[in-house]
Image: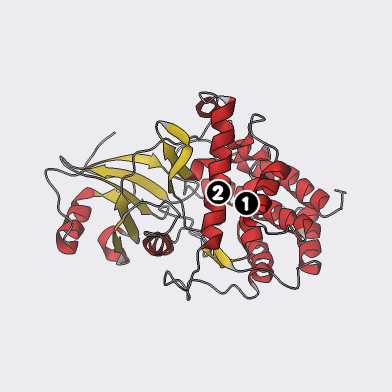
């Protein structure tokens, strides 16, 4: 679909912004929605000569901890010359009067998104194993980047990061909850009592899994760009690893509204993925049960938030109304990881 105006995207306003920012164009701007509703809205924009990707927050239902396109743009700009593949940055607009919200524009990267089970099933077992190895390698490469050397020394506060995560997602639950869940409150209490005394610091993606990357069209064992950086910051790298592993839970299918590639049984188990990371990085998985508990807690709150925004009319597309059904099994998995059961 191409149009002069899509919900959340005014192409006439974008043309004026491009003109002022010195971004050359040729012919009329056109666009199509790539994805929208659960996260930032993502549009492919193109003219007669060039292609871009524009990201902006949803049109309603904003939360303080997500949808930060300026943050996405900043980290991608910092990683341009690093071993982590990212899209080339083009322009950032933080003036909400231009289009009603901030937006960021990057170059369009030609690659394959492996989003669904059907996408994954086009790969051989050898290709899948190579892809997983590459995903782990790229995550390890991200965590090895010195944030000071790439100009991200003020990108976050790694000291106390884990403790703040526990508090942040508890506060977010209070904002988006559609019901009371005693087991979720128990999981939060356990996490608050079990915060590791020390942790490492690194650039963390915050939402890392197969469909938040683009792989080469002719080689699924090569990541050409890591995308969806809106939750990135400086923090504990084991939170990133644990989130990647927890996304393997079947509840992700409910959250995404489709059979997700990342939940497929053709992939290595979460434990094996974690071990591959430990082997690549040489990092021990201390307090691993805590990190899995936190990752399940976070994903449960995100799932509830998707349904909350859907009920507020702040989503675009289908598959949002049932996301809250993923919360109880995720909470149960979090409690189990911490050695507790549901009641």
Question: Would you name the residue on which mark 1 appears?
Answer: 280
> Residue 70, position in %: x, y?
39, 64
Quadrant of residue 263 within the rendered picture: top right
Residue 204 in view here: no
In this rendered view, identify the residue nearer to me: 111 or 137: 137
> Residue 267, position in %: x, y?
64, 33
Residue 76 in view here: yes
User: Residue 131, labelled with which disc?
Assistant: none
Q: What's the colour scheme?
A: secondary structure
Question: Would you name the residue on which mark 2 appears?
Answer: 137
In the rendered structure, which disc, 2 or 1, sits on the residue that comes first in sequence? Answer: 2
In this rendered view, identify the residue nearer to me: 334 or 316: 334
In this rendered view, identify the residue nearer to me: 144 or 196: 144
Quadrant of residue 30 within the rendered picture: top left
> Residue 295, position in %: x, y?
68, 54
Tell me the CA gap for discs 2 and 1: 7 Å
Residue drawn at point x = 79 percent, y = 47 percent: 332
Q: Are marks 2 and 1 in contact (CB under 8 Å)?
A: yes
Label 2 packing within 10 angstroms: few (<14), some (14-19), many (20+): some
Callout 1 secondary element: helix
Residue drawn at point x = 49 percent, y = 69 percent: 147
Callout 2 secondary element: helix
């Amino acid at each position: 679909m191409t149009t002069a105006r899509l919900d959340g995207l005014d192409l006439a306003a974008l043309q004026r912004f491009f003109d002022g920012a010195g971004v050359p164009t040729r012919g009329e701007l056109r666009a199509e929605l790539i994805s929208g509703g659960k996260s930032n809205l993502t549009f492919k924009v193109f003219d007669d000569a060039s292609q871009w990707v524009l990201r902006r927050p949803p049109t309603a239902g904003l939360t303080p901890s997500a949808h930060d396109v300026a943050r996405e743009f900043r980290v991608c700009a910092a990683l341009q010359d690093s071993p982590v593949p990212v899209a080339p940055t083009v322009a950032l607009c933080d003036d909400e009067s231009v289009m009603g919200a901030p937006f960021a524009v990057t170059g369009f990267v030609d690659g394959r998104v492996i989003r669904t089970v059907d996408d994954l099933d086009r790969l051989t077992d050898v290709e899948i194993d190579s892809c997983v190895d590459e995903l782990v390698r790229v995550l390890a490469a991200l965590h090895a980047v010195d944030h000071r050397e790439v100009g991200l020394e003020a990108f976050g506060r790694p000291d106390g990061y884990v403790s703040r995560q526990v508090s942040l997602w508890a506060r977010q639950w209070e904002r988006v909850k559609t019901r009371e869940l005693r087991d979720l409150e128990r999981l939060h209490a356990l996490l608050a009592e079990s915060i590791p005394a020390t942790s490492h610091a690194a650039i963390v993606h915050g939402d890392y899994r197969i469909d938040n990357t683009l792989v080469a069209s002719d080689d699924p064992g090569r990541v050409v760009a890591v995308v969806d950086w809106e939750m990135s910051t400086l923090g504990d790298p084991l939170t990133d690893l644990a989130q990647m592993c927890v996304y393997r839970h079947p509840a992700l299918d409910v959250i995404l509204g489709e059979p997700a590639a990342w939940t497929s049984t053709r992939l290595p188990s979460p434990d094996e993925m974690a071990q591959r990371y430990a082997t690549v990085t040489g990092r021990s998985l201390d307090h691993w049960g805590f990190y899995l508990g936190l990752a399940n807690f976070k994903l449960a709150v995100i799932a509830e938030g998707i349904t909350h925004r859907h009920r507020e009319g702040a989503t675009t597309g289908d598959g949002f109304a049932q996301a809250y059904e993923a919360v109880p099994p995720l909470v149960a998995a979090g409690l189990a990881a911490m050695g507790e059961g549901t009641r």
